[in-house]
Amino acid sequence: MSSSRTIPYTCPYCGKTYDIEVWDSVTADEDEDLRDRCVSGDIFRNTCPHCKKDFMVQFPMVYIDRSHRFVLWLSQETPGEDLIRTVAAPLAPQGYTLRRTPTLKEFAEKIQILEDGTDDRAVELAKYDSLIEFLDNKKGTLEDITGIEYQRTENEVMKINIRTNDKGLSFLIPVSMVLEEMEENSTLYEVDNSSFPVVNAEWIIGLFTPDDTNQSLN
Ligand SMILES: [Zn+2]
């Protein structure tokens, strides 16, 4: 069951305190409206009643989707023992995908990826391959890129968008092609599902640059 509570929050703009609602857990298949507000980001959007500024407030949340069999832990922090014991221990053996998403953007995107039933590791590899193709074909430079996003999977083909300041480019990538690429080196892409691993741009770059030269793509 979804659960929320009201906490005092101090506006970062005017410094006045007021009450906001934060959701500790969302059960997506029972609360479709909450699911939609998670994807749109509205659940995190706040308007200060004093200075009327709009801003996002990220709070730790457990997001469970039983029909698509996944659990997301929205947090900058690794999960505590409680979450491992009460959520990971019973659900991981049932084939649930468990992931931690540190940012709101990754959180919303991950919901869509896992609802589509697409392997999110394959999505990150597809994004990486798209980036390499974008750069190799001189469509732009790394500095031009403002974001690399998963859009959807349709008929087993992933659509990846590389956004730049002026426009952008879409890549259509067959899921089977990426899964084959992963099979060639399967241990490289292994994650410890039951510990809520982070599978994002930093993760895939980290696989190809094992030293400390990781750079952010977002
Ligand atoms: Zn304010």
Image: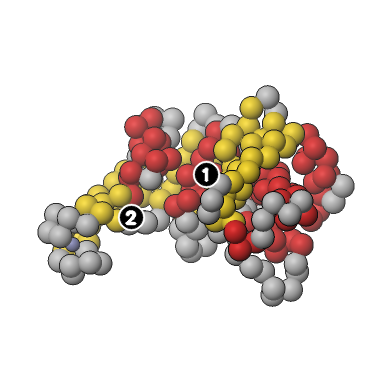
At 85% from the left edge and 51% from the top edge, which residue is drawn? 185
At 60% from the left edge and 59% from the top edge, which residue is drawn? 144
Q: Give the crowd class for mark 1: few <14, some 14-19, many >=20 residues within 10 Å.
A: some
Q: Classify mark 2: helix, strand or loop.
A: strand
The image quadrant where one finds the N terminus is top left
Sequence-earlier tag: 1 or 2: 2
Location of residue 11 in the rendering, given as x and y in whole percent from the top left corner: 22, 64
Instruction: Evaluate whether residue 212 shows in this view.
Output: yes
At 47% from the left edge and 56% from the top edge, which residue is drawn? 103
Q: Residue at label 1?
A: 109
Give the residue type at disc 2. Answer: Met
Give the residue type at disc 1. Answer: Glu
Classify residue 138 as left or right of residue 61.
Answer: right
Q: Residue at label 2?
A: 56
Whereabouts is ligand 1, in terms of quadrant?
Answer: bottom left
Location of residue 147 in the rendering, given as x and y in whole percent from the top left corner: 56, 53
Location of residue 199 in the rendering, given as x and y in whole percent from the top left corner: 62, 53
